[in-house]
Image (cartoon, rainbow, N blue to C red):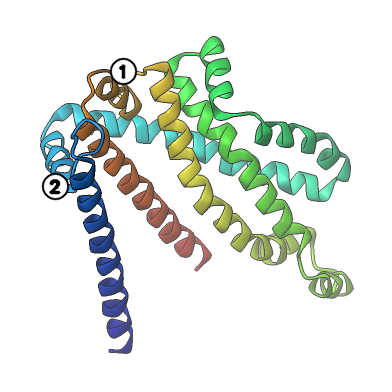
Amino acid sequence: MKTSSLFRKHFIKNFAVIIFWLFVWEIAAVIVGSNIILVSPRMAFARLFALGQTTEFWRSITVSMWRIMQGFGLALVIGILIAAASARFKIIYTLILPAINVINAVPIASFIILAFFAMSTARVSIFVPFVMVLPIIFHNTYKGIINTNSEILEMAKIFCVPYWKKILYIYIKSAAPYVLAGAQVGIGFAWKSGIAAELIVQARGTIGGSLHVARIHLQTADVFAWTIAIVLLSYGMEKIFLLLFKRVKA
């Protein structure tokens, strides 16, 4: 009963916050008074509902989601492996860190343009999320590993615990919260960078490509509708990842 009550309060609180910002959006649309600059939430959601009844809408979402999640998945796996190797061998950390810092410093647009010169549009929207998320996963995982409790490691050494068991029961447990935090941030970055890549390279049959078409034709309602879809998809993927992480952890 207590859990149900807390869930109800949490739901009501979030619902109230959403209603508040929708009201602010509605007022802003009335003040602006131009549907080309800012549409009302009613128009945006009505357009989203209309798009949701088309096959092209769901096909675009499927294509974009598949590519972006590929990039995110690659960044998650490779970032963890590189961080683990860097924590184990300092020479690898010394060699890898400059490249990670360069990736952090280079603007997303530059990566998109350079990638477009070297690969197909489909691969660009996989590569760009991968590059953007990799430093986040690397830094978080590395921090989690090096912050492993030294007393627990010393105890494992005294009792001659095999190295693979230390990895499985000590290092992974220590790094898991850091990886989770990085992944939560990374999912948002993956969606932002992936859609930006599709938009710039004008990838057909994708969310970014649809945003490009809406921009060209000044279809502001479509822009807002697709943006709402992106936010919902990013939020949904984050929640699914959290659920899977908890299942694996359990």
Judging depth in this view, the residue of 62 and 48 nearest the camera is: 48
Residue 116 lies, with reference to residue 174, above or below; the image says above
Q: Earlier in the sequence, mark 1 or mark 2?
A: 2
Residue at image position (70%, 59%) is 144
Kindly give the residue lying farthest to the bottom in the view shown: 1
Direction from residue 230 to residue 49 in the image, left or right: left
Q: Quadrant of the N terminus?
A: bottom left
Figure check: 193 above or below 243: above
Position of residue 209 relative to residue 35, above or below, is: above
Q: Residues within 10 Å of mark 2 (few under 14, many from 20)?
A: few
Q: Position of residue 81 (x, y in %)?
A: 68, 43
Q: Is residue 85 above or below residue 184?
A: above
Mark 1 residue crowding within 10 angstroms, few (<14) / some (14–19) / many (20+): some
The residue at the point 58 percent across, 22 percent down is 110
As helix, strand or loop, the secondary structure at mark 2 comes to helix
Q: Which residue is mark 1?
A: 204
Q: Give the amino acid type for the residue marked by disc 1 in the picture.
A: Arg
Question: Which residue, given by chain and number where applicable, does mark 2 sit on?
Answer: 42
The residues bearing labels 1 and 2 have C-alpha atoms spaced at a distance of 28 Å
Mark 1 vs mark 2, foreground winner is 2
Where's residue 3, x and y in %?
33, 84
